[in-house]
Amino acid sequence: MSEISEELLEEEVRLLEEQIELIEDEVEVVEEQIAAEHAHPTRPRAHVVIENQDDGETIRFWSPLAATVGQVISRMYAKFRLTQEAGDRLVRLSDGANVYPEADKTVKKYLEEQKEGTSLRWSFRSETGGA
């Protein structure tokens, strides 16, 4: 009888994990819609979403298109209350490309090159991994 219960629990966990994935996908779509709706013709800006893999915190803010990627990175560190370390990793969620080498580009140029709309979606992990 416990085998049946374990099988049912495993199936229920699998179904819940699928539901979570669907909800996360819906959240991404809604964030993109919000970003598009808040695009302002006289103050163009990008929606920034950065996930901190060390502690699970996600930050969201708007960046002017004229700002540099380096300025966005600096703001990220301030919002996460961290100091940049040599081994830190900051990558695009879409393809895992390293963001740090792009620091001198404007947000506008960076967005044009990555061809992903009006949002910067990155993942951060510190050198120590939160230790």
Image: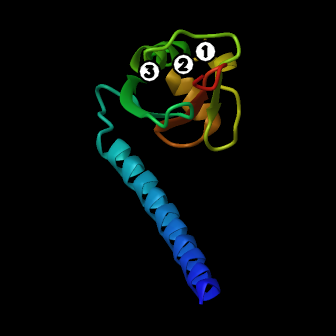
Residue 102 left/right relative to 18: right
- Name which quarter of the figure residue 29 lies in: bottom left
Residue 69 marker: 2
* Quarter occupied by residue 1: bottom right
Tag 1 secondary structure: loop
Question: What x and y, as percent, mark residue 32?
Answer: 41, 48
Q: Earlier in the sequence, mark 3 or mark 2?
A: 2
**Contact (Cβ within 8 Å) of mark 1 with mark 3:** no
| Residue nearest the observer in this picture, 57 or 40 | 57
Estimate how packed mark 1 is, as few (under 14), some (14 to 19) or many (20 or more) residues with alpha carbons within 10 Å: some
The residue type indicated by label 3 comes to Phe
Q: Residue 80 has which mark?
A: 3
Q: Which residue, given by chain and number where applicable, does mark 1 sit on?
A: 103
N-term-proximal mark, 1 vs 3: 3
Residue nearer the viewer, 51 or 66: 51
Query: At x 54% / y 77%, what residue is drawn?
Result: 9
Binning the other alpha carbons within 10 Å of mark 3 as few (below 14), some (14 to 19) or many (20 upward) gives some
In the rendered structure, find residue 48 and report the number of the disc placed on it. none
Q: Position of residue 68 (x, y in %)?
A: 51, 15
